[in-house]
Amino acid sequence: MQLTFLEYGILLALFIAIFSLLILIRKTFKFGRKKLRSEPQGRELNGIFYAFGQGMLPWEKESAAKHLPTYIGGIFYHAGLFTAFFYVFLLLLRLPVNGPLLIIFQIIFGIGFLSGIGLFIKRISVSSLRKISCPDDFCANILVDVFILLALLDTLLGGIRPVLNIITIVVLLYVPAGKIRHCFFFFYSRILFGMFFGRRKVLGHKHTEGRA
């Protein structure tokens, strides 16, 4: 399998992104882990299951429940981003993307892009959001919007693969440096959240009383 210069660039950017994110994780342990002296009241695993299951539902989060369209838009937006990455790496592996899979990708890209534009408009039009936003918020949004749009156009038109590869490299390098890194740290933080509250039997034990 012969890769192009830009495709090698994607792999290098991926390595840099992963290495940088691992360094950031290591820094979170810089001050050590606080020793918990009390006896565990529940299972950490139950808390993790809750964090990635029931805890993700909008009615479990006050902010999400009060802003349901934004919550749903965010889901589609992040789905568009992850699917765009998946699409690019399928191309790198020279795996075919056609038939029903191609249609699914196009739908996700389309809805994801529109969701990203909607979230951008909300950020600049709602005063309370605009006041707490920083340049990184706008830059990250625009960058991801362009990435998803180019992935969609590549499936529809073709001929823009080099441009898609370039923006992929830019996004990957931006991940550890900017706000996009929350897509990675989300999973890490939810695991820690679930472990802590699962251990205390605060979350994730509604149906396991007497078995913890």
Image (cartoon, rainbow, N blue to C red):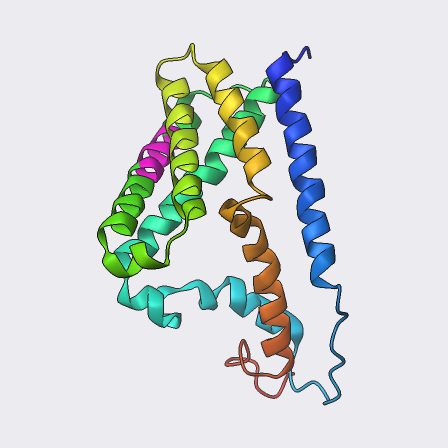
Residue 72 pos. (x, y %):
32, 53
User: Is 4 situated above or below 47?
Assistant: above
- Judge left or right: residue 205 versus residue 64: right
- Which residue is at 57% across, 34% downward? 172
Residue 150 pos. (x, y %):
40, 24
| Quadrant including the C terminus | bottom right
> Does the magenta stretch mainly form a helix, a strand or a loop?
helix
Q: Total of numbered circles in the picture? A: 0
Residue 107 pos. (x, y %):
33, 33
Q: Quadrant of residue 138?
A: top left
- Judge left or right: residue 43 versus residue 74: right
- Which residue is at 39% across, 71% downward? 60
Residue 34 within the magenta-colored segment of the rendering: no
Q: Which residues are magenta?
A: 104-113
- Which residue is at 70% across, 34% downward? 15
Is residue 93 among what the camera can see?
no
User: Is 69 situated above or below 163?
Assistant: below
| Quadrant including the N terminus | top right
Depth check: give the residue in front, 172 or 39: 172
Depth check: give the residue in front, 90 or 149: 149
Is residue 132 among what the camera can see?
yes
